[in-house]
Image: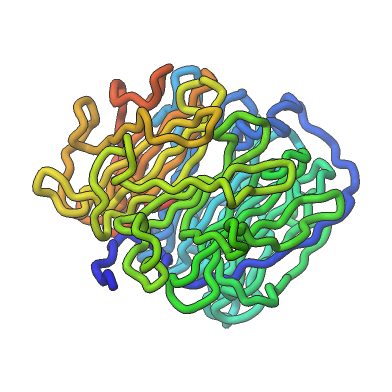
Amino acid sequence: MNRRGLRWRLGLTSAIAVTSAVTGPVAAQAQGTAPARIALAAELRDDFNGDGYSDVAFPAPSGTVGGKAKAGYVAVMYGSSTGLKTSTKQVFHQDSAGIPGVAEAGDAYGSSVTTGDLDGDGYADLVVGAAGEDVGTISNSGSLAVVWGGAKGLSGSGSATLAVGDEAHDRLGWTVRAGDFDADGAIDVVGVENYLNLRVLSGPFGRDGSSRSTASVTDMEDMRLLDLAVGDIDGDGVTDLVAVVNSLDEYDWRHIRYWTGTKTGLTGPTSVRRANGFRLEGGERLDVGDVNNDGIDDIVVGRAVDGYDSDLGIPTANGGMITYVPGSNNGPVGTQAKVFNQDSAGIPGVAENNDAFGEFIQVADINGDGYADVSVGVPGEDFDGRDQAGAVVTLRGTAAGLTGTGARSYSQNTAGVPGTAENNDGFGAAGKLVDTNGDGRAELVVGAPGENADAGSVWVFKSDSSGVTPTGSSTFGAGTLGTVATGALLGSTFNH
């Protein structure tokens, strides 16, 4: 078994249960002055100020605030016609004016971050999990809070708590996602608590943080959650919930489950299966998007953690692999799954133990051809005498699905990319594809949490008709944000 762990891997060794949710009808809510399309268009769900450009949040749950280690913070930058502007940066933490709570050691504010228009005013809002938050005398119960968007962007004023964990070590907020799972036009929020349940908050939300209803649901099969994603995987126009889970200790027997959205809420769960009826092997990370441009979202799973018994019958698991599962009107088609690793035709590099190929997965159209492409983190990649320096690989979407043909690799040693690859940088530990300049092509944002002795840094790559380009790429870290660098692991996660 592979024992050489990646130091920046935050919480992957913790098993979290994933379960189904129920939502229902919603009352009408007054709309703001921002264009309605901003609240409805998936590509603009990250638009906090309603200017038509997507924005990006950079959580640092390990960041120091007010001398409190791992209190955590979330930085934000706004999109524009020229992309992200560092001059627009904001930093929120629990000592910021208006933000609920007080920064304390181990709160991990920013454990998970998602976005959506919770109050229906036309502006995206920021939902922040703090998995280490203590509530009264209850240790590590966790919390979910919202920072409201508006015409001037996000503001701590009026921010509110959405929910807190009920018991010690519930760690609510470790994972959070948002979507309209019952097609009523209101965004719902799903957070994981106590590694066994989903806390389901049904929208719309009041400005005081109140939701229309809340429920905690237990998965009777005790499936442990590793990651969640949302999208329409059956083409019915309603948001579905997809997860990678495992049912035993550690990482053995990972597979893919999904809950379909309906007018009465999520139904399921259902496991993606192979032709022989057995569950298709999954991984630890995933995202969804329309890779084959058929109008239905597909699933892409990253299996970065190798060396466990369940890998014995899967040679491609060595060094990490990704699995592409096309969607259909009947849901994901496991019998048509395609598997790739760094030994696959066209994929740069060589599959080696602990490369962590698949540590992050993002799906979006990079080159503007109408097919969603895939970016893959390889933070354990060794090259040029550097150990775990890290890289990112992009793969193209086509009418036939995902392909290795034309795949590209980027690292800090790629010509035109700022910085120099060093031992344990972990470049590619996290990433995000997002169109911040409104040109119809997603830029690539990459984190290297090990950079500068675990201070961490973020890189932003532009894109053109050929895909991601190192030309004009830039980087920033704690100096730009005005935050404490020591141990922040900036770039370990982004908003989803």
| Residue pictured at 77% horizontal, 38% vertical | 237
Camera-nearest residue between 133 and 81: 81
Camera-nearest residue between 118 and 303: 303
Residue 472 picture location, percent across and down: 30, 22
Q: Does any portion of residue 135 appear in the rendered image?
A: yes
Question: As displayed, is residue 67 above or below residue 334?
Answer: below
**Is residue 291 found left or right of 461 in the rendered image?**
right
**Is residue 438 found left or right of 457 in the rendered image?**
right
| Residue pictured at 23% horizontal, 46% vertical | 350
Question: As displayed, is residue 66 above or below residue 45?
Answer: below
| Residue pictured at 81% horizontal, 55% vertical | 265
Q: Does any portion of residue 66 appear in the rendered image?
A: no
- Furthest toward the left, the residue is 385
The structure's colour scheme is: rainbow
**Is residue 397 found left or right of 390 in the rendered image?**
right
Question: As displayed, is residue 188 above or below residue 71?
Answer: above
Q: Quadrant of the N terminus?
A: bottom left
| Residue pictured at 24% horizontal, 67% vertical | 4
Residue 240 picture location, percent across and down: 70, 49
Quarter occupied by residue 404: top left
Camera-nearest residue between 258 and 328: 328
Residue 238 picture location, percent across and down: 76, 43
Question: As displayed, is residue 54 above or below residue 228?
Answer: above
**Is residue 399 found left or right of 190 in the rendered image?**
left
Residue 113 picture location, percent across and down: 54, 51
Camera-nearest residue between 471 and 84: 471
